[in-house]
Amino acid sequence: MFLVTFTFGQAFAGANLIQNGTLQLSSPSKMPYEWKLGEWAGMTGTHEIIPGKSGKAIQITVSGSDETVADRGVAFQQLHPTTVHQGEVYHYRDYIKGTVAKVYLDVEFLRFDGSKFYRGITYSKPYGEWMRVDDTFTVPPGAVAMTVLRVVKDNGVIAFDNISLWQDAIKCEKGCVSFAFDDSRGQQLVPRILHDTGIYATFYVNPVPITEKWEPIVMPLSTLRYLARYGHEIANHSATHLHPKLLPPDVLHNEVVWSKHRIENLVNRSVLSFAYPYGESDATVIAKVKRFHSSARGVEVGQNAINTDDYNLKTLVVTESMSVAEVKAYIDEASNTGKWLILSFHTISRAKTGAVWNYRAADLRALILYAKEKQTHIITVSDGVARFLK
Ligand SMILES: [Zn+2]
Protein backbone atom coordinates (compact mmCIF):
# COMPACT_ATOMS: atom_id res chain seq x y z
CA MET A 1 0.00 0.00 0.00
CA PHE A 2 1.46 3.33 -1.09
CA LEU A 3 0.31 5.75 1.55
CA VAL A 4 2.22 8.92 0.82
CA THR A 5 -0.08 11.10 -1.21
CA PHE A 6 1.26 13.96 -3.28
CA THR A 7 -1.50 16.38 -4.17
CA PHE A 8 -0.56 19.07 -6.61
CA GLY A 9 -2.54 22.12 -7.58
CA GLN A 10 -4.62 22.15 -4.42
CA ALA A 11 -5.70 25.66 -3.50
CA PHE A 12 -4.33 26.84 -0.19
CA ALA A 13 -7.54 28.48 0.84
CA GLY A 14 -6.98 30.29 4.07
CA ALA A 15 -4.94 30.80 7.17
CA ASN A 16 -2.88 28.01 8.65
CA LEU A 17 -4.48 26.57 11.81
CA ILE A 18 -1.09 25.28 12.96
CA GLN A 19 0.69 27.89 15.02
CA ASN A 20 4.37 28.50 14.26
CA GLY A 21 4.19 25.89 11.50
CA THR A 22 7.30 27.31 9.81
CA LEU A 23 9.16 26.93 13.14
CA GLN A 24 10.63 30.41 12.83
CA LEU A 25 9.75 31.12 16.48
CA SER A 26 12.42 28.72 17.74
CA SER A 27 15.62 28.96 19.75
CA PRO A 28 18.24 26.16 19.88
CA SER A 29 17.73 25.43 23.57
CA LYS A 30 13.94 25.32 23.79
CA MET A 31 11.10 23.49 22.11
CA PRO A 32 9.77 25.72 19.30
CA TYR A 33 6.96 28.05 20.33
CA GLU A 34 3.57 26.23 20.46
CA TRP A 35 5.08 22.72 20.05
CA LYS A 36 5.87 19.85 22.37
CA LEU A 37 7.18 16.28 22.31
CA GLY A 38 5.05 13.44 23.61
CA GLU A 39 7.11 10.45 24.78
CA TRP A 40 5.86 7.08 25.99
CA ALA A 41 6.88 3.45 26.67
CA GLY A 42 10.42 4.50 27.60
CA MET A 43 11.16 6.29 24.34
CA THR A 44 12.75 9.73 24.30
CA GLY A 45 13.41 12.45 21.76
CA THR A 46 16.07 15.15 21.83
CA HIS A 47 15.69 18.06 19.46
CA GLU A 48 17.82 20.59 17.65
CA ILE A 49 17.05 23.45 15.31
CA ILE A 50 18.53 22.90 11.84
CA PRO A 51 18.38 24.74 8.50
CA GLY A 52 15.02 23.87 6.98
CA LYS A 53 13.17 23.67 3.71
CA SER A 54 12.94 27.38 4.37
CA GLY A 55 14.44 29.12 7.41
CA LYS A 56 14.50 26.95 10.51
CA ALA A 57 13.36 23.35 10.98
CA ILE A 58 13.33 20.91 13.87
CA GLN A 59 15.27 17.66 13.95
CA ILE A 60 14.48 15.03 16.57
CA THR A 61 16.79 12.17 17.53
CA VAL A 62 14.69 9.29 18.81
CA SER A 63 15.99 6.55 21.12
CA GLY A 64 14.78 3.88 23.53
CA SER A 65 12.61 1.94 21.09
CA ASP A 66 11.60 -1.55 22.24
CA GLU A 67 9.99 -3.44 19.36
CA THR A 68 8.23 -5.85 21.72
CA VAL A 69 6.05 -2.96 22.95
CA ALA A 70 3.44 -2.15 20.29
CA ASP A 71 2.20 1.09 21.85
CA ARG A 72 5.44 3.06 21.91
CA GLY A 73 6.57 6.29 20.37
CA VAL A 74 7.73 9.86 20.34
CA ALA A 75 5.23 12.39 18.96
CA PHE A 76 5.94 15.87 17.66
CA GLN A 77 2.71 17.78 18.23
CA GLN A 78 1.01 21.10 18.86
CA LEU A 79 0.93 22.27 22.47
CA HIS A 80 -2.88 22.63 22.57
CA PRO A 81 -5.71 20.93 20.64
CA THR A 82 -7.55 22.73 17.83
CA THR A 83 -11.32 23.16 18.11
CA VAL A 84 -13.13 21.14 15.41
CA HIS A 85 -16.69 20.18 14.51
CA GLN A 86 -18.05 16.92 13.18
CA GLY A 87 -17.91 16.61 9.39
CA GLU A 88 -15.34 19.35 8.78
CA VAL A 89 -12.68 18.45 6.23
CA TYR A 90 -9.04 19.23 7.06
CA HIS A 91 -5.96 19.18 4.87
CA TYR A 92 -2.60 18.50 6.48
CA ARG A 93 0.79 19.13 4.91
CA ASP A 94 4.37 19.04 6.11
CA TYR A 95 7.90 18.35 4.93
CA ILE A 96 9.94 15.52 6.43
CA LYS A 97 13.51 14.25 6.13
CA GLY A 98 15.36 11.60 8.12
CA THR A 99 16.56 8.07 8.77
CA VAL A 100 13.71 6.50 10.74
CA ALA A 101 11.84 3.70 8.98
CA LYS A 102 8.39 5.30 9.16
CA VAL A 103 6.67 8.46 10.32
CA TYR A 104 2.99 8.09 11.23
CA LEU A 105 0.38 10.79 10.86
CA ASP A 106 -2.19 10.15 13.60
CA VAL A 107 -4.91 12.38 15.01
CA GLU A 108 -5.88 12.44 18.66
CA PHE A 109 -9.54 13.48 18.94
CA LEU A 110 -11.12 14.78 22.14
CA ARG A 111 -14.75 14.22 23.08
CA PHE A 112 -16.93 16.64 25.06
CA ASP A 113 -16.25 14.68 28.27
CA GLY A 114 -12.48 14.99 27.77
CA SER A 115 -11.93 11.36 26.73
CA LYS A 116 -9.73 10.64 23.70
CA PHE A 117 -9.76 8.45 20.61
CA TYR A 118 -7.27 8.08 17.81
CA ARG A 119 -7.31 7.72 14.04
CA GLY A 120 -4.30 6.61 12.01
CA ILE A 121 -4.32 8.74 8.84
CA THR A 122 -1.22 7.63 6.95
CA TYR A 123 2.49 6.87 7.27
CA SER A 124 5.48 7.91 5.22
CA LYS A 125 9.00 6.61 4.65
CA PRO A 126 11.38 9.55 4.91
CA TYR A 127 14.77 9.79 3.25
CA GLY A 128 17.70 12.20 3.13
CA GLU A 129 15.97 14.98 1.20
CA TRP A 130 12.95 17.08 2.15
CA MET A 131 9.77 15.33 1.04
CA ARG A 132 6.29 16.81 1.10
CA VAL A 133 3.47 14.83 2.72
CA ASP A 134 -0.21 15.69 2.16
CA ASP A 135 -3.34 14.14 3.49
CA THR A 136 -6.98 14.95 4.00
CA PHE A 137 -9.34 13.72 6.68
CA THR A 138 -12.83 14.37 8.02
CA VAL A 139 -13.67 15.01 11.67
CA PRO A 140 -15.59 11.96 12.97
CA PRO A 141 -18.78 12.11 15.06
CA GLY A 142 -18.21 12.93 18.71
CA ALA A 143 -15.01 14.94 18.26
CA VAL A 144 -14.82 18.50 19.62
CA ALA A 145 -11.07 19.08 19.33
CA MET A 146 -8.01 17.44 17.84
CA THR A 147 -4.24 17.30 17.88
CA VAL A 148 -2.31 16.07 14.85
CA LEU A 149 0.52 13.77 15.96
CA ARG A 150 3.69 13.02 13.99
CA VAL A 151 4.67 9.72 15.61
CA VAL A 152 7.95 7.81 15.35
CA LYS A 153 8.24 4.31 16.83
CA ASP A 154 11.83 3.42 15.91
CA ASN A 155 15.22 4.84 16.75
CA GLY A 156 16.75 7.32 14.33
CA VAL A 157 16.56 10.89 13.20
CA ILE A 158 13.54 12.77 11.82
CA ALA A 159 13.14 16.43 10.81
CA PHE A 160 9.98 18.46 10.19
CA ASP A 161 9.33 21.81 8.51
CA ASN A 162 6.55 24.00 7.05
CA ILE A 163 3.64 22.29 8.76
CA SER A 164 0.15 23.38 7.84
CA LEU A 165 -3.44 22.48 8.50
CA TRP A 166 -6.32 24.15 6.76
CA GLN A 167 -9.98 23.65 6.04
CA ASP A 168 -11.95 23.43 2.82
CA ALA A 169 -12.65 26.90 1.48
CA ILE A 170 -16.08 28.44 1.71
CA LYS A 171 -17.19 31.15 -0.63
CA CYS A 172 -19.97 32.77 1.38
CA GLU A 173 -22.20 32.93 -1.71
CA LYS A 174 -25.14 33.57 0.60
CA GLY A 175 -23.01 35.45 3.10
CA CYS A 176 -21.14 34.36 6.18
CA VAL A 177 -22.03 35.53 9.69
CA SER A 178 -20.09 35.21 12.95
CA PHE A 179 -21.57 35.85 16.38
CA ALA A 180 -18.93 37.20 18.79
CA PHE A 181 -19.16 38.02 22.50
CA ASP A 182 -16.63 40.43 24.01
CA ASP A 183 -15.20 41.18 27.44
CA SER A 184 -15.87 37.85 29.23
CA ARG A 185 -19.30 38.95 30.46
CA GLY A 186 -21.24 36.48 32.61
CA GLN A 187 -23.41 35.16 29.76
CA GLN A 188 -25.77 32.94 31.72
CA LEU A 189 -28.27 33.04 28.85
CA VAL A 190 -25.96 32.63 25.84
CA PRO A 191 -24.88 28.95 25.96
CA ARG A 192 -28.52 27.83 25.85
CA ILE A 193 -29.35 30.09 22.89
CA LEU A 194 -26.33 28.79 20.94
CA HIS A 195 -27.22 25.21 21.82
CA ASP A 196 -30.88 25.61 20.83
CA THR A 197 -29.99 27.19 17.50
CA GLY A 198 -27.09 24.80 16.86
CA ILE A 199 -24.42 27.38 16.08
CA TYR A 200 -20.83 27.92 17.24
CA ALA A 201 -19.75 31.39 18.37
CA THR A 202 -16.53 33.21 19.26
CA PHE A 203 -15.87 34.51 22.77
CA TYR A 204 -13.17 37.19 23.06
CA VAL A 205 -12.16 36.92 26.71
CA ASN A 206 -9.82 38.48 29.28
CA PRO A 207 -8.24 35.79 31.47
CA VAL A 208 -7.35 37.94 34.50
CA PRO A 209 -10.89 39.11 35.31
CA ILE A 210 -12.06 35.51 34.90
CA THR A 211 -9.48 33.90 37.19
CA GLU A 212 -9.64 36.75 39.73
CA LYS A 213 -13.48 36.79 39.60
CA TRP A 214 -13.91 40.50 38.99
CA GLU A 215 -17.41 41.58 39.95
CA PRO A 216 -20.17 41.94 39.05
CA ILE A 217 -20.47 40.68 35.51
CA VAL A 218 -17.50 38.48 34.72
CA MET A 219 -17.76 35.01 33.20
CA PRO A 220 -17.13 32.13 35.66
CA LEU A 221 -14.20 29.88 34.74
CA SER A 222 -16.62 26.94 34.61
CA THR A 223 -18.62 28.70 31.87
CA LEU A 224 -15.46 29.46 29.90
CA ARG A 225 -14.40 25.82 30.06
CA TYR A 226 -17.87 24.60 29.15
CA LEU A 227 -17.96 26.87 26.09
CA ALA A 228 -14.53 25.62 24.96
CA ARG A 229 -15.45 21.96 25.44
CA TYR A 230 -18.71 22.45 23.58
CA GLY A 231 -16.85 23.66 20.46
CA HIS A 232 -17.18 27.41 20.67
CA GLU A 233 -14.09 29.42 19.83
CA ILE A 234 -12.29 30.97 22.78
CA ALA A 235 -10.30 33.99 21.60
CA ASN A 236 -7.95 36.51 23.18
CA HIS A 237 -9.17 40.00 24.12
CA SER A 238 -6.01 40.79 26.18
CA ALA A 239 -5.17 39.97 29.78
CA THR A 240 -6.94 42.87 31.51
CA HIS A 241 -8.42 45.11 28.75
CA LEU A 242 -5.96 48.02 29.02
CA HIS A 243 -5.70 50.58 26.21
CA PRO A 244 -3.06 48.78 24.10
CA LYS A 245 -1.41 51.82 22.51
CA LEU A 246 -0.26 53.38 25.77
CA LEU A 247 1.61 50.39 27.12
CA PRO A 248 5.33 49.83 27.78
CA PRO A 249 6.65 46.84 25.74
CA ASP A 250 6.68 44.36 28.63
CA VAL A 251 3.09 45.20 29.56
CA LEU A 252 2.00 44.94 25.93
CA HIS A 253 3.67 41.52 25.76
CA ASN A 254 1.76 40.50 28.86
CA GLU A 255 -1.55 41.75 27.51
CA VAL A 256 -1.14 40.01 24.14
CA VAL A 257 1.16 36.98 24.48
CA TRP A 258 0.95 35.98 28.14
CA SER A 259 -2.83 36.39 27.89
CA LYS A 260 -3.02 34.02 24.94
CA HIS A 261 -0.98 31.37 26.80
CA ARG A 262 -3.06 31.84 29.92
CA ILE A 263 -6.30 31.24 28.01
CA GLU A 264 -4.80 28.23 26.20
CA ASN A 265 -3.83 26.72 29.54
CA LEU A 266 -7.23 27.46 31.09
CA VAL A 267 -9.25 25.81 28.32
CA ASN A 268 -6.70 23.45 26.72
CA ARG A 269 -7.44 24.76 23.24
CA SER A 270 -5.33 26.55 20.70
CA VAL A 271 -6.15 30.30 20.73
CA LEU A 272 -5.95 31.82 17.26
CA SER A 273 -7.99 35.04 17.21
CA PHE A 274 -7.47 38.41 18.91
CA ALA A 275 -9.69 41.48 19.36
CA TYR A 276 -8.06 44.83 20.14
CA PRO A 277 -9.40 46.24 23.45
CA TYR A 278 -11.49 49.35 22.65
CA GLY A 279 -10.69 48.55 19.00
CA GLU A 280 -7.39 50.39 19.45
CA SER A 281 -4.24 49.42 17.61
CA ASP A 282 -1.12 50.84 15.99
CA ALA A 283 1.81 49.32 14.09
CA THR A 284 3.50 48.09 17.30
CA VAL A 285 0.35 46.46 18.63
CA ILE A 286 -0.49 44.88 15.27
CA ALA A 287 3.05 43.45 14.87
CA LYS A 288 2.86 41.88 18.31
CA VAL A 289 -0.58 40.40 17.71
CA LYS A 290 0.29 39.16 14.22
CA ARG A 291 3.17 37.02 15.42
CA PHE A 292 0.94 34.99 17.71
CA HIS A 293 -2.56 35.04 16.18
CA SER A 294 -4.16 34.27 12.82
CA SER A 295 -6.48 37.31 12.91
CA ALA A 296 -7.47 40.40 14.87
CA ARG A 297 -10.73 42.31 15.02
CA GLY A 298 -11.26 45.98 15.70
CA VAL A 299 -14.52 47.86 16.14
CA GLU A 300 -14.63 49.56 12.74
CA VAL A 301 -18.09 49.07 11.25
CA GLY A 302 -18.31 47.04 8.10
CA GLN A 303 -18.44 43.72 6.29
CA ASN A 304 -15.36 41.60 5.54
CA ALA A 305 -14.50 40.76 1.96
CA ILE A 306 -11.86 38.62 0.29
CA ASN A 307 -9.36 41.49 0.38
CA THR A 308 -10.00 42.51 4.01
CA ASP A 309 -6.89 42.67 6.18
CA ASP A 310 -7.05 39.69 8.60
CA TYR A 311 -5.56 41.94 11.31
CA ASN A 312 -8.23 44.60 10.88
CA LEU A 313 -11.41 42.55 10.67
CA LYS A 314 -14.51 44.71 10.69
CA THR A 315 -17.63 44.15 12.73
CA LEU A 316 -20.94 45.56 13.80
CA VAL A 317 -20.90 46.14 17.56
CA VAL A 318 -24.54 45.62 18.49
CA THR A 319 -25.77 48.03 21.18
CA GLU A 320 -29.04 48.11 23.07
CA SER A 321 -30.49 50.95 21.03
CA MET A 322 -30.21 48.98 17.76
CA SER A 323 -33.44 47.37 16.65
CA VAL A 324 -33.54 43.81 15.35
CA ALA A 325 -34.57 45.21 11.95
CA GLU A 326 -31.51 47.43 11.87
CA VAL A 327 -29.16 44.50 12.52
CA LYS A 328 -31.05 42.28 10.06
CA ALA A 329 -30.21 44.82 7.36
CA TYR A 330 -26.51 44.03 7.90
CA ILE A 331 -27.23 40.29 7.61
CA ASP A 332 -29.14 41.05 4.39
CA GLU A 333 -26.13 42.94 3.05
CA ALA A 334 -23.78 40.01 3.81
CA SER A 335 -26.28 37.65 2.22
CA ASN A 336 -26.75 39.78 -0.91
CA THR A 337 -23.08 40.56 -1.48
CA GLY A 338 -21.40 37.29 -0.37
CA LYS A 339 -19.50 39.05 2.38
CA TRP A 340 -18.64 38.03 5.91
CA LEU A 341 -20.34 39.89 8.78
CA ILE A 342 -19.09 39.65 12.37
CA LEU A 343 -21.72 40.70 14.92
CA SER A 344 -20.21 41.63 18.29
CA PHE A 345 -22.21 41.58 21.53
CA HIS A 346 -21.43 42.26 25.17
CA THR A 347 -23.91 41.53 27.98
CA ILE A 348 -27.01 39.53 27.05
CA SER A 349 -30.01 40.06 29.37
CA ARG A 350 -33.67 39.08 29.43
CA ALA A 351 -34.82 42.70 29.31
CA LYS A 352 -33.52 46.05 28.21
CA THR A 353 -31.42 47.58 30.98
CA GLY A 354 -30.66 51.04 29.65
CA ALA A 355 -26.97 50.10 29.33
CA VAL A 356 -25.36 50.65 25.93
CA TRP A 357 -23.47 47.32 26.00
CA ASN A 358 -26.51 45.19 26.53
CA TYR A 359 -28.79 43.27 24.17
CA ARG A 360 -31.97 41.32 24.76
CA ALA A 361 -31.64 37.53 24.67
CA ALA A 362 -34.82 37.19 22.60
CA ASP A 363 -33.42 39.61 20.02
CA LEU A 364 -30.12 37.72 19.83
CA ARG A 365 -32.08 34.52 19.24
CA ALA A 366 -34.13 36.24 16.54
CA LEU A 367 -30.96 37.38 14.74
CA ILE A 368 -29.42 33.91 14.80
CA LEU A 369 -32.63 32.39 13.44
CA TYR A 370 -32.74 35.08 10.75
CA ALA A 371 -29.13 34.37 9.66
CA LYS A 372 -30.08 30.68 9.45
CA GLU A 373 -33.25 31.42 7.51
CA LYS A 374 -31.18 33.44 5.01
CA GLN A 375 -28.94 30.34 4.63
CA THR A 376 -25.77 32.24 5.51
CA HIS A 377 -22.83 30.15 6.74
CA ILE A 378 -22.61 30.75 10.48
CA ILE A 379 -18.96 30.31 11.40
CA THR A 380 -16.51 31.11 14.16
CA VAL A 381 -14.00 33.86 13.43
CA SER A 382 -11.00 31.51 13.19
CA ASP A 383 -12.99 29.30 10.80
CA GLY A 384 -13.78 32.41 8.76
CA VAL A 385 -10.13 33.35 8.47
CA ALA A 386 -9.12 29.76 7.75
CA ARG A 387 -11.86 29.12 5.19
CA PHE A 388 -12.98 32.38 3.58
CA LEU A 389 -11.57 32.06 0.10
CA LYS A 390 -8.63 34.41 -0.38
ZN1 LIG B 1 -13.67 44.91 24.95
Image (cartoon, helix red, strand yellow):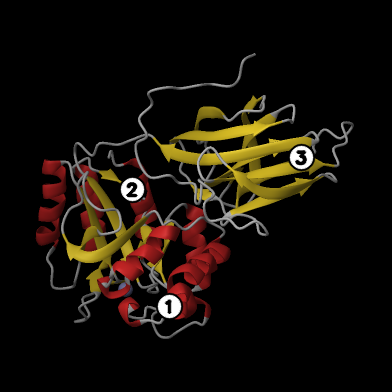
Residue 156: x and y in percent read 78, 35
Q: Quadrant of the image for the N terminus? A: top right
Q: Amino acid at mark 1?
A: Pro
Q: Amino acid at mark 3?
A: Gly
Q: Which residue sits at x=56%, y=66%?
A: 266
Instruction: Categorize mark 1 by other alpha carbons within 10 Å: few (<14), some (14-19), many (20+).
Output: few
Residue 326: x and y in percent read 10, 61
Check the image and report above or below for 104 versus 60.
above
Q: Quadrant of the image for the C terminus? A: top left
Residue 136 visible somewhere in the drawing: yes
- Badge 2 is on which residue? 385
User: Residue 244 occupies which quadrant of the picture?
Assistant: bottom left
Q: Quadrant of ligand 1?
A: bottom left
Alpha carbon distance from label 3 to label 2: 34 Å
- Relative depth, front residue between 215 and 38: 38
Check the image and report above or below for 2 versus 90.
above
Q: Amino acid at mark 2?
A: Val
Alpha carbon distance from label 3 to label 1: 41 Å
- Badge 3 is on which residue? 73
Q: Which mark is residue 249?
A: 1
Indicate which disc, 2 or 1, sits on the residue closer to the N terminus.
1
Indicate which disc, 3 or 2, sits on the residue closer to the N terminus.
3
User: Residue 189 occupies which quadrant of the picture?
Assistant: bottom left
